[in-house]
Amino acid sequence: MARKYEQLASSIIGNVGGSENISGLTHCVTRLRFQVNDDAKVNTEALKNTDGVVTVIKSAGQHQVVIGNHVPEVYAEVTQQANIGASPIAAPTKVMTPGARILDFISGIFNPIIGVLVGSGMLVGFLFVFTATGLIPQGSDLFDFFYNIGFSILYFIPVALGYTVAKKLDMNPLLGLAIGAALMHPALQDRDLNLFGLHVNVNYTQTVLPVILTVILASFIYKALMRVIPNVIKTFVVPMLTLAIAVPIGFLLIGPLANAAASGIARGIVWLYELNPILGGFVLGGLWQLLVITGLHMGLVVIGLVALAAGPTPLLSFIFTASFAQTAVVIAIWQRTRSRNLKNVALPAWISGIVGVTEPAIYGVTLPRIKYFIVSCIGAALGGAYLGFMNMLTYQYTGIGIFAIPRFFGGDRSVPTILIHVLIAIAIAMIPAYLFTLFTYRDQPDLADGVTDNNVLDDATDDEVASDFRVTNYGEAAMASAIASPVSGVVRPLSESSDQAFSQGMLGPGALIIPTEGVVVAPADGVVTTVFPTGHAIGLTTDDGAELLIHIGINTVELGGQHFTTLVQQGDRVVKGQPLVEFDMDAIKGAGYSLETPVIVTNYDNYQGVAETNAHLVTQGEQLLTLS
C-alpha cells in the first residue's frame, strides 16, 4: 500500500531539481527548508501548485516549502526517497551591514556578563552610600573587602571577555578564558620583560580591547589547527599551540599598540586643553565613554594619575560628567519603556551610574540603542566643555560618580563656589540628554529588516478595551470559544508578519505578538500535540477543539534549540496559564532574529470566524482570539 505522503514527497523532490540538487535539508514546524546546488533547477511555480504544498518562499539562501502541520511526516518521506540523512539545523549566513555586524558582536560578547556587571555596580554603589553616611569608614577592612568584591568583575574583565568572545567565535570558550587569564597574570603586569627581541612593560587588568583582539586572532589559529591536527591528539595539542602562538602576539604586539593608542589620545587631549580649555573639555568628555568600551580609558587614567602626582591636572576633570550624562539617558529610557525586561536592566544600571559605574548602562541599555549612546556622549561633551571653560582642575583622586565631587576641592576657590560649578556642569550634561531621550525614545519594531526589538511597545494605554476584535474574513456567528494570549506583549495584525506564510494567512488566521517576556504559557486547557525539538514552536489542541500553533520568532529554527527551554512534552495535558516554553529574548535578538510570535488557528475550517483583539497590549491570560 502506498505511503500517505509518497506522491507529495516525490513531486517536491522532482521540482527542487532532484535529490542530486539537494545540498541540505532541514525542517521546522511548518516547512521544509532546502538548500540546493543550483537555483535554476528549482521549479518554484510547479512546487506552489503541488497538492499539499501551501506555498514556496525563497529566503536566507533557502527554498522553504511550506507544508503545514504534517511537515514531519513529509520530511521523513522526502529524506527516505532522496536517500539523505537528517541534517542538523544550521543557520545560513545572514546578510548584515558592517555596523550591524559590529553591534551584533558587541552584544554577543557583553550580554552574558551584563547581569554580573549590574550586580557588581550596585554593590559598589551602596558601599559608597554607606561610606558617605558614615556607616562604613572608607579605608577600613570592611570597605576594602566589599570594594574589591564589587570591582572584581571589572578588574578581571579580560578573563570574562576571553570566554564570551571565544564562545561568540565558535572557539573553545575555556581557551578564550585562558587567554584572558594569561594576558593579566599578576606575575607579568608592570614588569620589564625582554622577549623575542622586544622590551615591554604593560598592565592589562581592567582592559577590554587587548583580549578581544587577541581572542579574534586566536580563533583563526584555533580553527586552522582543528582542521590539520589529528583527532587523537587535537584535544590538548590545539589549545597548547593556540596559546603558544596567540598570547605572545597579543601580549607583546596587540596590547602595547592599544596602550600606545591611549597614550596618544591623552597627549592629544593635553594639547587640545592647552590650545583651548573648552575644546579640550568637550572632546575628552565626549570621547570618554568610547574609551571605556574599548578599554583604552585605563591608559588615560594612568597618565592622569601621573600628572596629578606633579600637581593639579585637568585630565581627570573632564571625564567627570560622562557618568551623569549616561545615567540621565538611562533614566529617561527606564521611564519611557514599557518593556519589563528593559526596565529590570535599566533601573539598577542608572542607580549604579549615579555612583560612577556605567558599564551596566552602556552595555545593557544604550550601546544596543546606539543613538542614545551618542546622545549620552554629547551630554558628557557639553558638561566637559563647561568644566574646561571654568578651568576646573582635579586636586586629588577620589571616588567616581557623585563621590568624585571632592576631587575639585582645592586651589583659591571656596568649597561652595566649587560645588556650584560642579552642579552646573552636571546639569548641563544631564538635562539636554535626559529631555532629548524622554521626548524621542520609543520602543519600536523594525519589521522591515526582519529584526524586531524585543522591547517593542506602543504608547497604548493598558485600559484599552480588549473585547473589541478584528474579524478575519470568516464571517460572523455566535461565539464558540475564547483563546487567551500565550505571551505578554504588543499585538499586531498577522498581516504585518515579516514572514510571507504567516502574513498571507497561508497556515491559518490568528494574531502576531511582539513579546516582552520570555515565556509562553498555555492559552487554554488542552493537550500538547506538537513540541518541536528546537523548542521554537509548539502545537496545542484545546478542550474546545481549537488547534493552535505558537511559533516563537521568525526563522528561529536555525538556532538549533539554543536559547529555548521546553517545559512540556508531546501528549502532556496542560491547564490555562501553565508555562510551556521559556526563551532568552536578548540572546535571540542578539543573534539577529525577529521575536515576532504568530499565534495561529490551524483548523480554521471548523470555524466561521476568527477574530483578534483590538487591544495594542496583552498580558498572558488576557483574551487574544475569539473563535465563532
Image: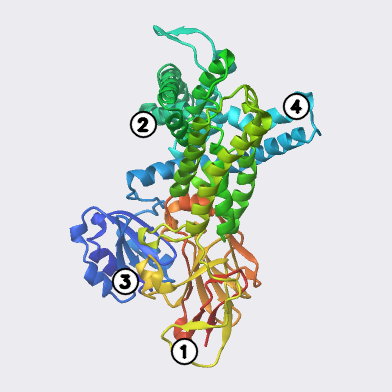
Which class describes the residues within 10 Å of circle 1: few (<14), some (14-19), or many (20+)?
Answer: some
Does the CB distance between marks 1 and 4 fall below 8 Å? no
Residue flagged by tag 3: what amino acid is it? Answer: Thr
Which mark lies nearer to you, 3 or 1? 1
Q: Which residue is mark 4?
A: 138
Give the answer, above or below, for where 177 lies relative to 49: above
Residue 392, given in percent of the width and then of the height, sits at 55, 28
Residue 225, given in percent of the width and then of the height, sits at 38, 27
| Real-space Cα separation, disc 1 to disc 4, in angstroms | 73 Å
Residue flagged by tag 2: what amino acid is it? Answer: Arg
Q: Which residue is mark 1?
A: 608
Query: Which structural element holds mark 3?
Result: strand
Residue flagged by tag 4: what amino acid is it? Answer: Gln
| Real-space Cα separation, disc 3 to disc 4, in angstroms | 69 Å
Q: Residue at x 56, y 25 (%)?
A: 393
Q: Which residue is mark 3?
A: 55
Q: Which residue is mark 2?
A: 227
Which mark lies nearer to you, 1 or 4? 4
